[in-house]
Amino acid sequence: MQLSARLVEGRLLKRYKRFLADVQLADGSVVTAHCPNTGSMRGCQPDNARVWLTTNDNPKRKLRYTWELVEVASGHVACINTARPNGQVGEAIEAGVIGELAGYATRRSEVRYGSENSRIDWLLSGHESQPDAWVEVKNVTLAEIAGAHSVPQGYFPDAVTVRGQKHLRELMAQVAAGGRAVLCFCVNHTGIEVVRPADHIDPAYGQLLREAAAAGVEVLAYRADDLADGSLRLRTPVPVILAS
């Protein structure tokens, strides 16, 4: 997945009302961009950060610009658009990058499932020897030093997520029913070398994630390495460490 060649660079002035961000462009003008991220964006909105926007000239759109990328304090680049990860993972599965999910003939998105009225990001079927795989995708952009760690770690979630806890319960139920369930962390931060549950932010999610893994839910992570070039392609497997 490659972002449009029409990426527009600017400086972040402020993010507000969750969905809006004011950005100063190179010519000094200030535009309001859509911020496609409902989360806390912890660590991804430093003052005067270098950001990149895509443009859309559809006259029916209220905002021409969409915020896609940000250069964080460490100098690494993160993709904050949470509409991207599902497509990134789907593309990586199709390209054979995610070897653990190779061999499925059919891939469907946003399939309703579970007792808690959920939609799975990807349902893979038609494997010669594996059961159908229910794949939930989560975007990882939070990198920070926490606890005893001396170098930045990647963490999920970046805020308390009741919805994320629901998804883990649904995945565990699929395993209990004889299916295959996979949680795939889409690492959209070029500086993240390992992913951990953010117990210091949402300890309930961390505990439930460990229970899910123990129950047979597979936990994977793959990183996009070339975000600075506008490429969102997942390339590199990243270890997931569940220990607190």
Image (cartoon, rainbow, N blue to C red):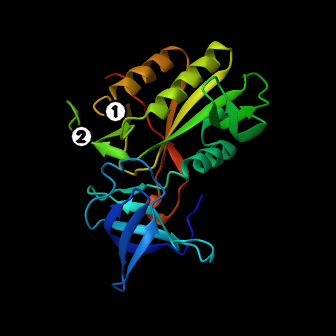
Q: Residue at x 54, y 48 (%)?
A: 85
Q: Residue at x 32, y 28 (%)?
A: 199
Residue type at the position of mark 2? Ile
Between 152 and 28, the residue placed more toward the observer is 28
Query: Which image quadrant: the N terminus?
Result: bottom right
Q: Is residue 71 left or right of residue 104?
A: left
Please tell me whether mark 2 or mark 1 is closer to you in this view: 1
Q: Is residue 203 above or below residue 195?
A: above
Counting from the top left corner in percent of width and height, residue 217 is at: 55, 22
Q: Residues within 10 Å of mark 1 (few under 14, many from 20)?
A: many
Secondary structure of residue under mark 2: loop
Counting from the top left corner in percent of width and height, residue 91 is at: 64, 49
Q: Is residue 217 left or right of residue 199?
A: right
Q: CA distance from mark 2 to mark 1?
A: 11 Å
**Is residue 108 in sight in this rendering?**
yes
- The label shown at residue 198 is 1
- The label shown at residue 145 is 2
Query: Which image quadrant: the C terminus?
Result: top left
Between 35 and 154, the residue placed more toward the observer is 35
Q: Residues within 10 Å of mark 2 (few under 14, many from 20)?
A: few
Q: Residue at x 63, y 30 (%)?
A: 117
**Is residue 103 in sight in this rendering?**
no
Between 149 and 97, the residue placed more toward the observer is 149
Counting from the top left corner in percent of width and height, residue 241 is at: 38, 27
Q: Residue 29 occupies which quadrant of the picture?
A: bottom left
- The label shown at residue 27 is none
Secondary structure of residue under mark 1: loop
Question: Which tag, 2 or 1, sits closer to the chain's start?
Answer: 2
Residue type at the position of mark 1? Ala
Counting from the top left corner in percent of width and height, residue 150 is at: 20, 37
Count of numbered circles on the image: 2
Q: Residue at x 58, y 24 (%)?
A: 171
